[in-house]
Amino acid sequence: MLDALDPADKGLWATAFYAGLRRGELIGLQPEDVDLANGVIHVRRGWDMLEGEIEPKSRKGRRKVPIPAVLRDHLYALERSAGPIFGTAHWVAKSTCALASAGRRSVCPCSRCTRPATRTHR
């Protein structure tokens, strides 16, 4: 199934499938959270579309997730840079915009949105 994906999306989906991380955990993942040398992903934070970066909801939410061999190859292939690994600013803004249209936010923050910037959502 991963072979059918755009190469830019394979790391994200491989991490979701093989590590079992939730959407907010994937968005909050930073380069220093992926320890390939020791074969673990440190889940230290999450991401909420309204709040931004958040602490895990419980002590069990902060954890070390083993990296299976099949996932390791996908993680090696990712370009390492500062900031979130999977949560690009536009992707997060686009998701927040979708929440705005669902009535969960008062103003759409997405600069690329097709909605006028001054439009308020219920």
Image (tube, grey):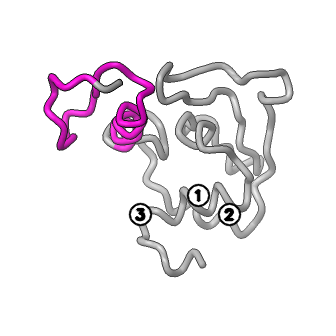
Most frequent secondary structure within the magenta stretch: loop
Q: Amino acid at mark 3?
A: Ala
Q: Nearer the viewer, mark 3 or mark 1?
A: 3
Identify which residue, 100 or 46, lies in the foreground: 100
Residue visible at 37% across and 31% down in the picture:
100
**CA separation in Å, label 3 and label 2:** 15 Å
Expressed as whole percent of the image width and height from the top left, the position of residue 101 reads 35, 36
- The answer to whether marks 1 and 2 mark residues whose Cβ atoms lie closer than 8 Å is yes
SS for callout 3: helix
Dot 3 and dot 2 residues touching (CB under 8 Å) = no
Q: Dot 1: what SS? A: helix
Name the mark on residue 43: none
Which residue matches tag 2? 71
Where's residue 33, x and y in %? 63, 36
> Which SS class for mark 2?
helix
The amino acid at mark 1 is Leu
Query: Which residue is rendered at x = 80% and y = 38% of the image?
Result: 64
